Image (tube, rainbow, N blue to C red):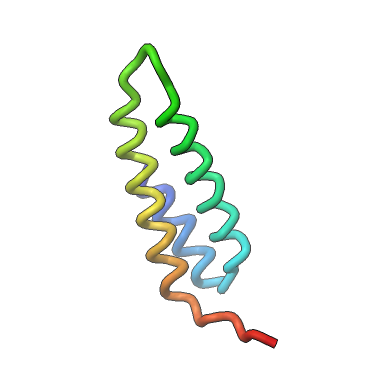
Amino acid sequence: MSLSVELIVEGYVKLNDRDALENILAHRQDLLRQLVAVTGVDPQQAIAQVNEEITIIEAGLATLVPEQQS
């Protein structure tokens, strides 16, 4: 799924859509919190995948021009 996330992030970066990137990042961070709390099964593979996606999203956000503060 990381390729999918990479393509989505690339699209949002081209559109300079910081809000969409921040929303997808918040979603993945929430998903990570939920996975960490899972008991009874080993969620390590899913956690690693979500961490990889968060890294991709943060890299996309880092390429955007900083928002102007008023």
The correct choice, above or below, for 19 with respect to 41 in the image is below
- Residue shown at the point (38%, 65%) measured from the top left: 59
**Residue 13: percent from the left, percent from the top?**
50, 69
Q: Pick out the residue farthest to the right.
A: 70
The correct choice, above or below, for 50 with respect to 64 in the image is above
- Residue shown at the point (30%, 38%) measured from the top left: 48
**Residue 22: percent from the left, percent from the top?**
56, 59
In the picture, the quarter occupied by the N terminus is: top left
Toward which corner of the image does residue 58 lie, by quadrant?
bottom left
* Left or right of 33, for residue 16: right
In the picture, the quarter occupied by the C terminus is: bottom right
**Residue 47: percent from the left, percent from the top?**
35, 35
- Residue shown at the point (50%, 81%) measured from the top left: 65
Q: Pick out the residue farthest to the top.
A: 40
- Residue shown at the point (39%, 41%) measured from the top left: 50
The correct choice, above or below, for 39 with respect to 70 in the image is above
| Total labels drawn | 0
* Left or right of 52, for residue 64: right
**Residue 16: percent from the left, percent from the top?**
56, 73
The correct choice, above or below, for 65 with respect to 35 in the image is below
Q: Nearer the viewer, residue 41 or 14?
A: 41
